[in-house]
Image (spheres, rainbow, N blue to C red):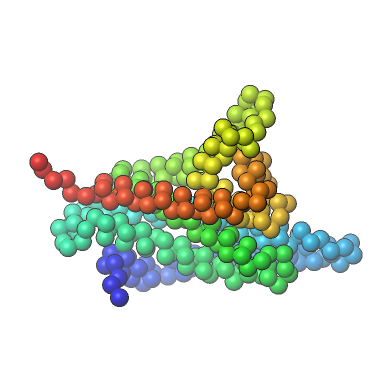
Amino acid sequence: MIINPVYKKESAITWKSLRLVLILSMFNLFLAIYMVSRVNAEIRNMIVLLEVNYRGIPAIFKSVVSISYAVALLVSSAISASGISSEIERRSLDIMLSTVLTPADIVLGKFMTCFFNILIYLGTGIPIFSFIFMYGGVSFMDFLMIILAYVMGAYLVICMGLFCSALLQKTGVANFFSYMLLLVVFVLSLALPKGIETLLDINIDFSSMGNGMVRNVLLLNPLSTFYMSITRISKNGVFWTSLFSPVEVITDTANADLYFFSGIFAQFLVGGVFLYMAIRKISPKVDQ
């Protein structure tokens, strides 16, 4: 089996340090403690009130997954934004390009390093997420769609971070603009329609043909597909529901799953475009 040499080197360096293991262990320990405390509080309420709250456990599940997802996005942006720029600052990129390695090998190797680190983080959290199956309320298909939306969000952020790293070539600057791009793509794109409604004091009908185009474009935002996946469980307990009014129209239709997977596929293509631009950016210029 042929392994990307850049990924092989980076992964060896990463796992020689205990830092990644400690960070993963500490954060997942925090998630486990948070989850257990919330579940115990929910069970105590059931005993005191002599009433079963069927929405309580799914709401805890959604909050735990949402916290983990937010951290994964922030970590993905941080580790990918230094991927190419760190090699430029150490002046090792030109040396790598003078070998048999191609620009695609370098960018894809950096991508694989970041992506598999996030998959390890997700993998260590899945046993914590799986507690929901003890109480019911989530089907296996629902769980898989949540994981798919989670992974695709991290994938797109890593692609954007590597593009910023190759374009700006300074780790500090690349980190800043990577987080700014994350803010624009993930948050501001969702807040814009709601802001227009509030500013103009109008109610936009996103089910109409013209506004439906805006709704479909928002499927490029991984937060939209993540929201669609967790609201398959229930819409209660999602404090940021008001931001997703354009996407809300989709979740109530028979084609909701089709929209979800179309959004996932579109995000995959957009991430590929960012990787391609990063490869082009570090490719040696050929004098005419």
On the picture, is 42 further left or further right than 220? right
Looking at the image, is 251 positioned above or below residue 47?
above
Foreground pick, 8 / 241: 241
Where residue 51 appears, as percent x and y from the top left, is: 87, 63
- Which residue, as the protein is rendered here, is positioned at the far left? 288
Residue at position x 82%, y 65% in the image: 44
Looking at the image, is 35 positioned above or below residue 185?
below
Looking at the image, is 240 positioned above or below residue 96?
above
**Observer able to see residue 215:** yes
Classify the position of the C terminus by image quarter.
top left
Where residue 30 appears, as percent x and y from the top left, is: 60, 64
**Observer able to see residue 92:** no
Residue at position x 60%, y 29% in the image: 196
Residue at position x 67%, y 25% in the image: 201
Quadrant assignment, res 58? bottom right
Label count reads 0
- Which residue, as the protein is rendered here, is positioned at the far top? 200
Classify the position of the N terminus by image quarter.
bottom left
Quadrant assignment, res 145? bottom right
Residue at position x 56%, y 32% in the image: 210
Foreground pick, 152 / 112: 152
On the picture, is 187 further left or further right than 280? right
Where residue 240 appears, as percent x and y from the top left, is: 65, 45
On the picture, is 15 further left or further right than 264? left
Where residue 106 appears, as percent x and y from the top left, is: 27, 58
